[in-house]
Structures are given as structure tokens and as C-alpha cells.
Amino acid sequence: MKLTKRVKKEWLELKHDGARAMVRIVLVLLFLLPVCYFRTDYLLYETARKQVELGIMDGIITIFGEPFAAILLAPLFLYLIQEIVSFDANEQITLRYGSRSSIWAAKVKKIFVHAFLFTCMVTAVEAVVGAPLLDYQNTWTSPGGMLHLIASAMDAQQGSSHMLTAWEQNQAFYHPIVIIGLTMIFGTLGLSSAAMAASIVSALTNRAIVGYFVVLLICLIDVFSRSFSLLFRQTIITHAEWLSFTGLFWNGLYLLGICAVLIMVGRSAWERKEYLFAKDKETVGDLR
């Protein structure tokens, strides 16, 4: 009888959590749809005077661009996974996982999976919204496309033909799957780093709001600081980096390094909490 009641209770809690998650997803989608539409429309307005061909690739790579990714996408993602970010382990959950470091490892996996799914959702929304506004053809391999225009402008400034040569030699690299894939990978790494940072600060301070505040501070630094960026500016793959891949490589390496450091710091912080939790239990036992 007790087992039946426990299973029923867990099922109801799971159903309730699923319903709340669905509500958050719907709210995020309702917010993203008009934002993506007006952002894409503004992109068309800005480039109309340049008489350049815009394609859906231009809309997708700019959807994760700064300050949009920092000011809008990061808070939306944290709102969507707020239960994962603010989750802390009680004694029963710790016993189930074996240790708090194991809980942190499971938490990191969930963050990466949700970050990837979130970038998929944002990319899909932009693709759907951009349908009536942008060309679905890959204009990056066309002489009238944005990439060719920027390469020509950079060569004109430098008095060379280096960028146009790079554009001609890397035509095969500008496949939609490659462009979308790399954009989503960089977006996933950036959002995962933000969520891990919020989780670590929340664990150390026992206040989730402090973790959200730290991420907001990082967003503001990345948007308004011209000389320094902690995270979100590295998630942007600029047109210049699509032409020469040096910046793309170093930004990817930086994001992977940030993720690795945050994973290690988070594991250390949760092991510290486990140690303090054990010491508290010993103190209570001595008092008894």
C-alpha cells in the first residue's frame, strides 16, 4: 500500500513538473515568434540599401548574435530550465546518486541537452518566421550574397584580394548544414556556460537569484564593454570569421575551455557542500 501511494505521488509530481515545463515552453515560443519576426525585418531594412541578397543563413547566424543572445536568449534559457539551475540535493537524493559530485555530473548533462534543444527551437523559430521574408536559397555561395559583399569590402580597405580568394576557396564549407551546425554548437556552449555559472553561484550562496544576477551581469558586460567580453561575444561567428577561420577556431577553443573550467569548479563546489553537509551531521550527532 505504501509503495502504491509513493508511486502515485511521484507520478503526480512528475505530471505537475511536465505541465509547468510545457507552460514555460509555450510562453517562450510566444515571446520568440514576434521578436524573431521584427529582428529579421530589421535585418532586411538595414541591408536593403546595400542591394545584397539575403538568405535564411543570414537570419540564423544573427539570431545568436550579440547583444541579442546575451540580453534575450540567455535569460529565456535560464527561465526555461530554472528548476535545473536552482536544484539542490537533500539527503535522500544524495544517497540515490551516491555523491553530490554525481548529482553535479547529471546536472551538467541536463544543462547541455537542454541548451542544445533550446538552440534547435530558436533556429526552427527563425527558419519558420524568416520564410516569408528571406530567401531559402544559400546566398553565401552567390556573388550577390552577404558574404561576397563583406569580402569585397574588406579587400577594398586592405588593397588586396585575400578575402575574395578565401571566399572562392571555401565554397564547399558554406553548406547550410555546416553553417547551422556550427552556429548551434557555439550557441549551445555559450548557453551551457551561462547556466553552469548560475548553478555554481546558486549552490555556493544557497540563493538562485544570486546566480541569475551574476549571469545578468555577464550579459551587461558583454553587451556594453567594447574591449572585454567574458562569454557571449565568443558565441558569435562573424562573417569575417566565416571567411578566415582563425577567429572561429580560437572562439570555439575559448568556449570549450570555459565549459571545462566551470565543470571542474562546479564539481569542487558540490563536493565542498557534501563535506559541509557531513560535518553538520557529525555536529548534530555530537549534540545528541
Image (tube, rainbow, N blue to C red):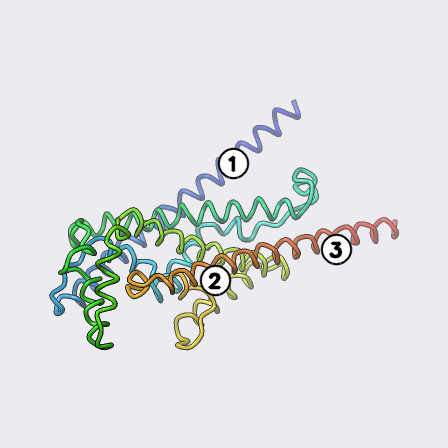
Front tag of 3 and 1: 3
> Mark 1 is on which residue type?
Leu
Q: Which residue is mark 3?
A: 276
Front tag of 3 and 2: 2
Instruction: Look at the numbered disc 1 and give the secondary structure of its residue.
Output: helix
Question: Mark on residue 14?
Answer: 1
Q: Residues within 10 Å of mark 2 (few under 14, many from 20)?
A: some
Find residue 231 and report its horizontal and vertical position in percent: 45, 64
Residue at figure coordinates x 67%, y 47% from the top left:
100
The mark that comes first in sequence, 3 or 1, is 1
Tag 3 near tag 1, CB within 8 Å: no
Q: Which residue is mark 2?
A: 254
Q: Residues within 10 Å of mark 1 (few under 14, many from 20)?
A: few
Residue at figure coordinates x 28%, y 63% from the top left:
239
Q: Nearer the viewer, residue 68 or 14?
A: 68
Q: Nearer the viewer, residue 254 or 265?
A: 254
Q: Is residue 130 above or below residue 11?
A: below
Front tag of 2 and 1: 2
